[in-house]
Image (cartoon, coloured by chain):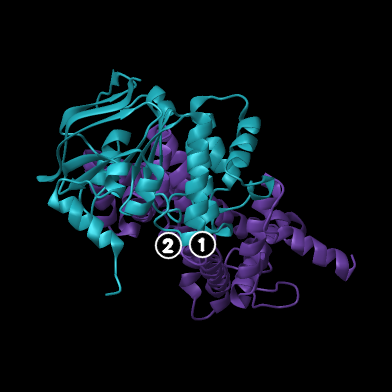
């Protein structure tokens, strides 16, 4: 299978601070790829750089074999969409769900908006009852479902997930993760998912990359991580930390 | 209408699951209205403004005399009486009628200034805030230059250049009153431009123009409406000031500021000539201020996420 997303030597610099120091990465089409690391390791910055929200200082990003320039065109946004971490901040406070979902359709000039909105809401498990609500009338999990519906409505092939469940409580987390998994299987999507939760990453992703201080530490498969077959000390520490408190 | 239908109507408006765009919008307006009408003083302000509108609309019916033609022979500077409620001025014109017709000019000034100044301020502020960099620097320095002048002095300069008259006074006031709106809109824009929901729209490939117009401006509008309403009193006073200085409305136009100016010669002996229009300005300014305060409570985007 060919690569849906390939990144080579990507650097991102904010006011002299090197947030990403030459990261390379390849995600196969239909794969689910995880990025793990502590806060400030550059994993979210990597997603933002792909989406065009953070400026790339050097390096190349290619989506489905096409190398991206500094400016993203509309075709790019129909291929790549993103779900943000905080569902409380990612929905416009003065727009109904209907309006939120209509916006991408209006921008890209889709004619069958009515049908698509209906389908998108059904797909994320929200009925029509939610269509004309404002964001403040929704719970955290419902908001994240709306955000997922908004990302899916343009039918992208790649979905960037920036800790999509870290702001939700445990039971809702599982629901949203299962929803994402189901959608990926049905639509044959490629996921690039950031998380600091190793359990989620091993559950969701086949392959993953461990990051630290803006650099890739190592590339692993999920089974290697589960079996603790890791080579770097940093990953070992991360694994130990994720096991948490162990009764002695 | 029975109590039951009122109840169901309220439930329909406050529904968690609106069934149409219309219902969602009406429900939101209803919540804002409930918050607004709970404030007694704001309600009084609204009544004053509605009163002003009614008086202006029905001036022809309400005014007992002509506002411009007086009886020089028999009724100069008469004290308030049953025939002339607010007395008459030095040209024998009925002051009550003049104040009623003057309400039209007051409304004319206030509405025109708001319609010209608010959109300019909104556009300059949101574009500066969203674009940042050079665009921001240039637009905001221009704003600073306008803000550095005292408002009335700048308006005076404009009127002096354009010539006296109420249209030019309106233009001069509009030109001097947009900078604060630009400041507010920019501040409001800066707080939302980096939020995830704006990023999400950027990620859909929306043009900057679309983002500013459809996603940022609606968030700035409520604070702008509040500010404009609170400024209305100031606008009326500036217009009255220009009228008083002889640079606004020209005689025989029954503009309140100009009426005070013409009455100041006999303010000690015939106090009603200047007092009546002064009182009218006071009431209307108070009405706009009370309304503005009420709107702030009802529309404040930071209260209750409404």
Q: Quadrant of residue A78?
A: top left
Q: Colour of chain B?
A: purple
Q: Which chain is cyan?
A: A
Quadrant where the C terminus of chain B is found in the figure = bottom right
Is B102 or B137 nearer to us in this picture?
B137
Marking on residue B305: 1
User: For this view, does A13 lie left or right of residue A115?
Assistant: left
Dividing the picture into quadrants, the one containing residue A67 is top left
Q: Which mark is residue A19?
A: none
The correct choice, above or below, for B230 with respect to B176 in the image is: below
Instruction: Check the image and report above or below for B294 versus A129.
Output: below
In the image, residue A199 sits, relative to residue A220, either above or below, namely below
Closer to us: A211 or B95: A211
> What residue is disc 2 on?
B241
Residue drawn at point x = 64 percent, y = 46 percent: A131
Image quarter (top left, top right, bottom left or bottom right) of the N terminus of chain B = bottom right
Q: Position of residue B92 (x, y in %)?
A: 63, 65
- How many marks on residues? 2
- Chain ID at mark 1: B
Q: Earlier in the sequence, mark 2 or mark 1?
A: 2
């Amino acid at each position: 299978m060919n690569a849906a997303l390939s990144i080579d030597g990507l650097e991102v610099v904010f006011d002299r601070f090197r947030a990403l120091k030459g990261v390379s990465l390849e995600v196969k089409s239909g794969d689910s790829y995880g990025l793990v690391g502590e806060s400030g390791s550059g994993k979210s910055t990597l997603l933002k750089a792909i989406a065009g929200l953070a400026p790339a200082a050097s390096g190349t990003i290619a989506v489905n074999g096409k190398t991206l320039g500094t400016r993203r065109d509309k075709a790019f946004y129909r291929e790549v969409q993103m779900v943000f971490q905080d569902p409380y901040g990612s929905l416009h406070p003065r727009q109904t769900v209907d309006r939120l979902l209509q916006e991408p359709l209006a921008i890209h000039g889709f004619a069958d908006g009515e049908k698509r909105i209906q389908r998108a809401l059904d797909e994320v498990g929200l009925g029509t009852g939610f269509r004309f609500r404002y964001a403040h009338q929704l719970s955290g999990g419902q908001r994240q479902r709306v955000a997922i519906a908004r990302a899916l409505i343009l039918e992208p092939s790649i979905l960037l997930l920036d800790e999509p469940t870290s702001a939700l409580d445990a039971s809702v987390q599982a629901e949203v993760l299962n929803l994402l998994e189901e959608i990926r299987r049905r639509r044959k999507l490629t996921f690039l998912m950031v998380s600091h939760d190793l359990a989620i990453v091993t559950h969701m992703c086949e392959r993953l990359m461990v990051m630290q201080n803006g650099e890739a530490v190592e590339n692993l498969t999920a089974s290697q991580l589960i079996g603790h077959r890791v080579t770097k000390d940093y990953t070992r520490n991360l694994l130990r930390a994720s096991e948490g408190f162990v009764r002695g | 209408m029975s109590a039951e239908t009122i109840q169901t109507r309220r439930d329909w408006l406050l529904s968690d699951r609106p069934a149409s765009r219309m219902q969602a919008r009406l429900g939101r307006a209803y919540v804002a209205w409930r918050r607004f009408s709970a404030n007694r003083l704001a309600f009084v302000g609204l009544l004053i403004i509605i009163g002003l509108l009614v008086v202006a609309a029905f001036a022809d019916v309400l005014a007992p005399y002509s506002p411009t033609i007086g009886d020089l022979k028999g009724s100069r500077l008469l004290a308030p009486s049953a025939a002339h409620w607010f007395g008459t001025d030095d040209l024998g014109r009925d002051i009550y009628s003049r104040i009623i017709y003057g309400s039209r000019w007051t409304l004319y000034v206030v509405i025109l200034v708001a319609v010209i100044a608010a959109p300019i301020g909104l556009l300059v502020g949101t574009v500066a805030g969203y674009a940042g960099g050079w665009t921001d620097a240039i637009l905001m320095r221009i704003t600073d230059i306008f803000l550095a002048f005292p408002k009335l002095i700048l308006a005076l300069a404009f009127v002096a250049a354009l010539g006296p008259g109420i249209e030019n006074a309106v233009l001069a006031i509009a030109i001097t009153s947009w900078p604060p709106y630009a400041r507010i809109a920019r501040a409001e824009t800066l707080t939302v431009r980096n939020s995830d929901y704006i990023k999400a729209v950027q990620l859909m490939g929306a043009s900057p123009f679309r983002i500013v117009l459809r996603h940022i401006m609606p968030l700035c509008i409520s604070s702008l409406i509040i500010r404009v309403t609170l400024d209305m009193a100031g606008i009326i006073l500036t217009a009255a000031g220009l009228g008083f200085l002889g640079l606004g409305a020209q005689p025989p136009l029954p503009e309140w500021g100009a009426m005070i100016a013409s009455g100041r010669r006999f303010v000690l002996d015939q106090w009603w000539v200047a007092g009546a229009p002064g009182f009218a300005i006071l009431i209307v300014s108070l009405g706009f201020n009370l309304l503005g305060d009420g709107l702030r409570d009802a529309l404040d985007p930071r209260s209750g996420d409404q």
